Amino acid sequence: MSSGEATLTTDALVDEALALGNGLGRPLRYVQINSFYNGSTGTIMRSLHKSLAACGVDSYIFWGRRHETISGHEQCFATRCGYLLHGAMARLDDRAGFHSKYDTARLLRLLDEIDPDVVHLHNVHGYYINIEMLFGWLASHRCQVRWTLHDCWAFTGHCPHFQYVGCNKWTKGCSRCPQRHGYPSSYLLDSSRRNWEDKRRVFTSVPAGRMTLITPSHWLEGLVRQSFLKKYPIEVRHNTVDRSIFKPTPSDFRERYDIGDRFMILGVSSPWTERKGLGDFVQLSEKLEIENYAIVLVGLSKGQLKSLPKDMIGLKHTDSAQELAGIYSTADVFFNPTVEDNYPTVNLEAEACGTPVITYDTGGCAETVGAVRSSTVLCAGADVATHIEAMREQCIVRL
């Protein structure tokens, strides 16, 4: 990138990269690292990569799992054997993030070759990287570090979320983890105290002047300011969705699934767990009259599809954003009963398609709604059925 004033874009991270590149006399070298190429965090990584490359930045993305290498600038650096072994060992010793030495050494050799000006981290959990080796390299290198925290794993001794169990041990030092059997699962040892201490040492080894933390929500920002990462600058950057895809989209979904003029309630998740509110949908189906309502869930597993109540419509996960936009647009309301989430993009996607959202006031959920006037934030456990019945009545009156 040549010297001179940077061209402003709508993406603050791209603007920042352009500003950092001013005066270098060459393109800025920008590297992103994430667990997955796909999924919500992978989509965020790829979107920034595309924008940076379009502005002349020498952009690279590296990931650990679920997609093969595409090019020299888009690489999967971890091996299947590596992440499977990492996951197996973590199930025994509860040391997720401290294995994968061979694969991490390969990544560090690539970083040495690139000599990046900026390294932007996303999820560093997922059984694919050794955080001690990675942060040792970052602490000794000249690069600026940007770290987008998509959950709380960075400052706990084990879990990515703790609201469901009401745990606050992470503020002083984890021990006797109540979620040891939850992701990242450990069936033998509880190393939460050691993990917390090692993460504090490792993650605070980068000088404060070279690392900035990014959170998608003010809610997560507040938690980080109570953690051992509080010495670092924190910026809140709300995630966005691709509005060229997620927009009101015609669909024959109602006809294909014989929904007719019934009031359609949509839920989308992958995977569906109790913490994502699967049970809330089952309870909702028991309270509403099937002749007036259709409950549709997208992202169910084969086992969940088999056990789903007969009066509910279940679909497996779809990789087609266009198909999903059509389903969002078809629904009368999108219900997201998650009890643990940072900044759920499904809420953004639904509203971008013109569909009102009902979500619980948990995590950063309340920060994701408001683009559609009739979207509502309720307390977890609220009488959702009554609220939906009122929404249907309003629709009938308008007609």
Image: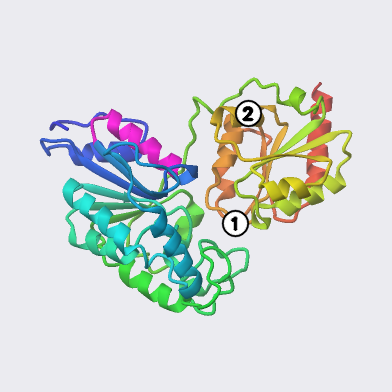
Quarter that holds the C terminus = top right
Q: Which mark is residue 185?
A: none
Tell me, yes or no, whether the highlighted magenta stretch contains residue 152. no
Return the residue at label 1.
340
* Rendered image quadrant of residue 109: bottom left
Tell me, yes or no, whether the highlighted magenta stretch contains residue 53. yes
Residue type at numbered disc 2? Gly
Q: Nearer the viewer, mark 1 or mark 2?
A: 1
Numbered disc total: 2
Q: Does residue 226 appear anywhere in the picture?
A: no
Return the residue at label 2.
354
Image location (x, y in percent) of residue 246: 55, 29
Image location (x, y in percent) of residue 39: 49, 43
Q: Which residues are magenta?
A: 42-57
Quarter that holds the N terminus = top left
* Rendered image quadrant of residue 23: top left
